[in-house]
Image: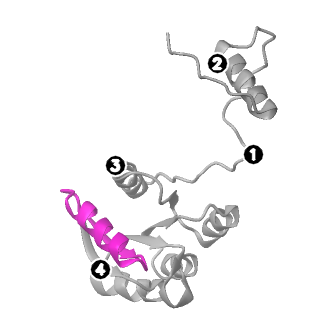
Amino acid sequence: MIDMVIAEDQAMLRDSLAYAIGTQDDMRVVAAIADAADALSAVEKHHANLALLDVCTENDSSGIVAAAAIKEAHPDVRVVIMTGMPEITFVEQARAAGVDSFIYKNVGTAELIAVIRSTMEGYSTFPRPPNQTRFPAPRRSRKRKSTSFAWCARRKRARKSRRSYTCPKAP
């Protein structure tokens, strides 16, 4: 059983996360708090084995600072950091704090649940830096421009010349 502490300052999101996670057979939310500064005491009080922490919480508390404290006191407790702000420094700071996984809030519930489960199994999930791609960029071909591109170009020229232009009918 995954016993989890959630630290999220937005009440509606905190309640939604607790509900969605609570519907899983292998997960239980033992505490849902607004301030990450209280995360370590909540982990200890409820014997949680995973903490899901927002980067920025109530009272200007940092989930990353809380994660470092949790990992120092209880290295066996898994920590997942979440944020809605795509700051690349947050990922680096989370790694330095010993966080097990990092996820953005724009993912769906199924992906969040999958990250939580894989983190408990010992896997780490971190976003790829924006300048690092899995595959090289495709080469540009010298083929003729597509009809949709040509249509867009005609429309743009028409707007510039202020002539009336009628969109072509779909085939």
Residue receiving disc 4:
31
Location of residue 167 with respect to 48 vertically, above or below: above
Residue 143 quadrant: top right
Distance Cα–Cα, label 3 vs label 1 = 27 Å
Residue drawn at (62%, 60%) of the image:
86
Distance Cα–Cα, label 1 vs label 2 = 30 Å
Between label 2 and label 3, give the one nearer the viewer.
2
- Residue range of the region highlighted in magenta in the rendering: 1-27
Identity, as a three-letter code, of the amino acid under mark 1: Asn
Identity, as a three-letter code, of the amino acid under mark 2: Ser
Location of residue 104 with respect to 65 vertically, above or below: above
Between label 4 and label 2, give the one nearer the viewer.
2
Residue receiving disc 1:
131
- Secondary structure beneath label 4: strand
Identity, as a three-letter code, of the amino acid under mark 4: Ala
Q: How crowded is mark 3: few (under 14 residues within 10 Å), some or many (20 or more)?
A: few
Q: Which mark is residue 65?
A: none
Front residue (pair 2, 75): 2
Residue receiving disc 2:
148
Q: Which of marks 4 and 2 is nearer the N terminus?
A: 4
Front residue (pair 91, 165): 165
Residue drawn at (42%, 53%) of the image:
115
Distance Cα–Cα, label 1 vs label 4 = 37 Å
Q: Where is residue 31 in the image (x, y as percent from the top left)?
A: 29, 79
Distance Cα–Cα, label 4 vs label 3 = 21 Å
Q: Where is residue 32 in the image (x, y as percent from the top left)?
A: 32, 79
Residue drawn at (39%, 53%) of the image:
121
Distance Cα–Cα, label 4 vs label 2 = 54 Å
Q: Earlier in the sequence, mark 1 or mark 2?
A: 1
The reply to whether dot 4 and dot 3 touch (C-beta < 8 Å) is no
